[in-house]
């Protein structure tokens, strides 16, 4: 019995460091003028149930957006909106000239609801439902623009994403994706 209590205590204490932003009130996200935007993407198409279509799997892309001031010391939260444009990266130099395959506009109220803290710090977690998805499209370029309420738009460095092959079945925690059989 004593060993169980000691184990439980260790688990609870270990969780305190990881959950401090959720349990300690008064910890608000750092704010300030932002000068830089950095983005990380999951390199695969994620399938999640679409409640508007009876739970049918909907493909999409997911990532994190971080905003920084002049120094990249800690991510900041700022009021504004987000625009993400998707291009076919296999089209070579034409990717610069053609219209995007898809574009998402996230208004300031929605972006505020997407604020989350992770191991890096405060940022925005986005899921972009990809209505024009085609499995043969294996490399895409994503361009991200943060439009602050006051100030000049910020552009994250464009990134080419090589998409790993996944199938729309199985999964857990609201995200469905499986590796194809090997």
Image: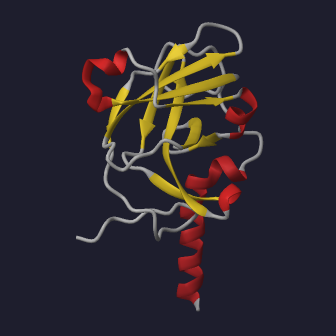
- Pick the residue in front: 169 or 17: 169
Q: How many marks overall?
A: 0
Q: Would residue 28 be seen by someone viewing this image from the given angle?
A: no
Is 24 left, or right, of 146 in this rendering? right
Q: Quadrant of residue 177?
A: bottom left
Relative vertical location of residue 107 with respect to residue 134 in this rendering, above or below: above
Q: Position of residue 115 (x, y in %)?
A: 65, 38
**Residue at 36% from the left image edge and 50% from the top image edge:** 135
Q: Which quarter of the rendered picture does the C terminus lie within?
A: bottom left
Q: Identify the residue at image location x=31%, y=51%.
A: 164
Q: Quadrant of residue 126?
A: top right
Picture coordinates of residue 128 (x, y %)? 55, 41
| Left or right of 105 on screen, residue 86 | left
Q: Is residue 46 visible?
A: yes
Query: In the visual, does 74 lie left or right of 50?
Result: left
Q: Residue at x 36, y 58 (%)?
A: 166
């Amino acid at each position: 019995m004593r060993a169980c209590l000691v184990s439980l205590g260790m688990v609870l204490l270990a969780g305190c460091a990881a959950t401090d932003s959720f349990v300690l009130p008064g910890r608000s996200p750092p704010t300030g003028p932002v000068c830089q935007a950095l983005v990380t993407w999951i390199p695969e198409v994620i399938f999640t149930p679409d409640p508007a279509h009876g739970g049918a799997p909907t493909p999409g892309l997911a990532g994190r957006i971080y905003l920084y001031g002049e120094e990249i010391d800690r991510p900041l939260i700022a009021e504004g909106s987000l625009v993400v444009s998707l291009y076919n990266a296999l089209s070579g130099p034409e990717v610069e000239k053609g219209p995007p395959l898809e574009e998402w506009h996230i208004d300031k109220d929605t972006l505020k609801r997407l604020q989350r803290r992770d191991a890096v710090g405060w940022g925005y977690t986005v899921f972009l439902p990809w209505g024009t998805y085609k499995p043969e499209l294996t490399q895409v370029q994503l361009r991200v623009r943060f439009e602050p309420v006051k100030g000049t738009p910020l552009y994250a460095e464009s990134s080419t994403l090589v998409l790993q092959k996944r199938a729309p079945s199985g999964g857990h925690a609201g995200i469905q994706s499986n590796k194809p059989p090997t």
